[in-house]
């Protein structure tokens, strides 16, 4: 009979380890303090024929009621300066570091590059998986390389940013979820920078929260405080109303599809006295639509169905009122996506990862 390593905890409840606060029991759970430990854990799991799942702070996942395998959490929380060239800073950040702690750590020291990503929940190890982004910034812009353990070989490798396949809310780590365990990220930040305030509400928040009327006078910390306040006004705090943040990606359509959608909406607006036009931002690949706008126009904002629903303040955030399970969240998400497709012909893609059996 195979012997389970003594460090593996048995039958662990993960409800407190995911921001949706969904009940989930893992057959085993183990803490990994460094990349070598990760490699050894993977070797043990392979020998025992056990499936492995990696869970950080659980802010971008939907957990089933049961995970019949091993859940690994990375506990290393170091921020190491590798090079400080005066105008540039290169640092290695362990996967277990809380993301917002890193953002504040860098902003307090006057470094630019992460400030608009303040208050995004989760750990540093999850950041490259989703290529997190907000208010005009993406993690990929400051990422130099990612350290990861190859699940097949157990080797610790370093992947240059160009090899990570970063795109909008995506990366090779997300596409190849069973191939890698991210153990650290190397960033390059800069001393000279300027505040990005083009997104709605950012400049106003900067003026109200920090008394800074001109973007060129803002510091990285000014931006962190402004973004933090803005996010707190718009998005429910997972500590008080469990959620996984934005549940759908902003869909990308061609310019022709965007124009057709606008013409369709203008006809509906005229018939029903709707105000405003379909919002969209032009990018290299086409036009990026607002998923929140589409969902709200289908009447979902603030909707509640038993234990689950959508936030009153933001149509993109699915919330868990308590007592529910993953199936209820996924069913509601599917109904939302179906209604958007039926009305606008646009397909919504889910952001949080469904950790299937």
Image (tube, rainbow, N blue to C red):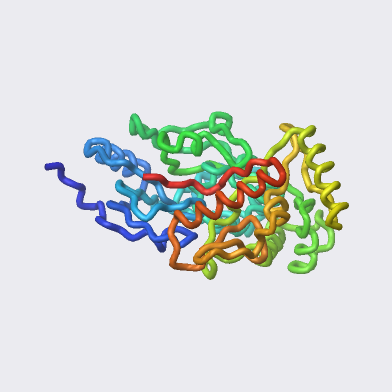
Observer-nearest of 125 and 4: 4
- Closer-to-camera residue (234/117): 234
- On screen, residue 280 versus residue 247, left or right, reads right
Residue 261 percent coordinates (x, y): 78, 41
Q: Nearer the viewer, residue 123 or 143?
A: 123
Q: Nearer the viewer, residue 43 or 346?
A: 346
In percent of the image, x 50 and y 56: which residue is there?
329
Residue 215 percent coordinates (x, y)? 81, 56
Which residue of the protein is positioned furthest toward the left in this rendering? 1
Residue 240 at least partly seen: yes
- Measuring from the top left, give residue 354's x and y in whole percent: 46, 47
**Quadrant of res 325:** bottom left
Residue at 50% from the left image edge and 44% from the top image edge = 92
Looking at the image, is 61 positioned above or below residue 151? below
- Which corner quadrant holds the C terminus? top left
Count of numbered tags: 0
x 68%, y 67%: residue: 233
Q: Is residue 334 left or right of residue 37?
A: right
Q: Split into 4 quadrants, where in the image is the N terminus? A: top left
Q: Position of residue 352 (x, y in %)?
A: 52, 49
Q: Is residue 85 visible?
A: no
Is 32 left or right of 184, judged from the image as shown?
left
């Amino acid at each position: 009979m195979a012997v389970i390593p003594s460090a593996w905890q048995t039958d662990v409840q993960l409800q407190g380890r995911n921001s949706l606060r969904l009940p989930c029991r893992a057959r085993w759970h183990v803490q990994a303090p460094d990349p070598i430990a990760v490699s050894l854990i993977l070797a043990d799991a392979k020998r025992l024929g056990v499936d492995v799942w990696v869970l950080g702070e659980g802010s971008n996942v939907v957990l089933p009621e049961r995970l019949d395998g091993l859940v690994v959490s990375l506990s290393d929380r170091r921020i190491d300066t590798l090079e400080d060239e005066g105008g540039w800073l290169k640092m290695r950040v362990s996967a277990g570091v809380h993301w917002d702690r890193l953002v504040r750590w860098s902003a307090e020291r006057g470094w630019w590059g992460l400030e608009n990503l303040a208050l995004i929940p989760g750990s540093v190890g999850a950041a490259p998986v989703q290529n997190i982004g907000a208010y005009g910034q993406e993690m990929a812009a400051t990422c130099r390389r990612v350290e990861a353990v190859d699940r097949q070989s157990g080797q610790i490798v370093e992947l240059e940013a160009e090899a990570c396949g970063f795109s909008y809310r995506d990366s090779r780590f997300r596409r190849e979820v069973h191939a890698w365990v991210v153990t650290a990220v190397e960033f390059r930040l800069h001393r000279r920078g300027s505040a990005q305030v083009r997104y709605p509400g950012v400049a106003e928040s900067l003026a109200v929260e920090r008394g800074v009327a001109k973007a060129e006078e803002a510091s990285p910390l000014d931006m962190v405080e402004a973004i933090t306040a803005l996010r707190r006004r718009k998005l429910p705090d997972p500590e008080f109303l469990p959620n996984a943040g934005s549940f759908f990606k902003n869909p990308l359509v061609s310019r022709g599809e965007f124009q057709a959608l606008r013409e369709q909406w203008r006809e509906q607006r005229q018939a029903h006295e709707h105000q405003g036009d379909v919002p969209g931002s032009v990018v290299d690949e086409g036009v990026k639509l607002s998923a929140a706008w589409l969902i709200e126009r289908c009447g979902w904002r603030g909707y509640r169905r038993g234990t689950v629903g959508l936030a009153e303040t933001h149509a993109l955030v699915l919330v868990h009122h308590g007592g529910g399970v993953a199936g209820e969240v996924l069913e509601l998400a599917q109904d939302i996506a179906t209604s958007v497709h039926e009305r606008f012909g646009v397909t919504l893609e889910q952001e949080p990862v469904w950790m299937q059996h």
